[in-house]
Amino acid sequence: MTVVPRPPDPVAFAPFGAFIDPPEEFGERAVFSDWLAPVPSRVQQCHVNRVARTTLPLSLDLVECHPHAAQVFIPMGEVSRYLVVVMPSSSAGGPDTTGAEAFIVQGSRGVSYAPGTWHTGIIALDADASFAVFMWRGGEDDDLFVSIPPLEISDLELGSAPSSDA
């Protein structure tokens, strides 16, 4: 199956989480505390991931899910763009790759995955990148990893013109 990435669409992404945008005006605060509400028997953790640059197209065969808590990624430093790949759960609770969505996100935005959202690891485009990650942890089932049939991510973004090299 091939998925063509598209620009962030908050409405299309809403079943999976939210994009985190900085405030538009100086002095304003953009509050996203709902995504970090306390989770019983878990403690809040923050860590920083360093992610190597990846190029499109690419093939993905592993997804993860955090059933108890949201997971928030905030780009740090010079992050140009990154890829977010999500999918719904099947009726059996595993990932449903037929509903996979991919978004190319500018480095000025963060992303929050809702609890139970199947997603790939964060994928840096253009250059190596770092991300601050916030979530609640405390159990062995905080991270579920599942192999999936290869999911091909196209190098053409929806809404963009094909290159003349194609």
Image (spheres, grey):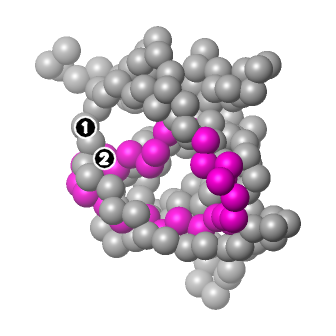
Residue visible at 62% across and 36% down? 118
x%, y% of residue 21?
59, 63
Q: Earlier in the sequence, mark 1 or mark 2?
A: 1
Are the residues flagged by discs 1 and 2 in contact, CB closer than 8 Å?
A: yes
Residue found at the very far front of the displayed protein: 140
Image side of residue 84 versus residue 35, left or right: left
Between 157 and 131, the one nearer to me in the picture: 131
The C terminus - image quarter: top left
Q: Specify start and end residues of the magenta stretch as a single range.
A: 119-144
Q: Which mark is residue 125?
A: 2
Is residue 143 magenta-colored?
yes
Q: Residue at x 77, y 20 (%)?
A: 92
In the image, is 81 to the left or to the right of 21? left
Question: Element type at marker 1?
Answer: loop
Residue 30 lies in magenta, yes or no? no
- 84 vs 158, nearest the viewer: 84
SS at mark 2 in the image: strand
Residue located at (55% from left, 73% from top): 46
Return the residue at label 1.
Answer: 55
Residue ranking furthest to the top: 1
Identify which residue, 65 or 154, lies in the foreground.
65
Residue 81 horizontal/vertical position (percent): 37, 51
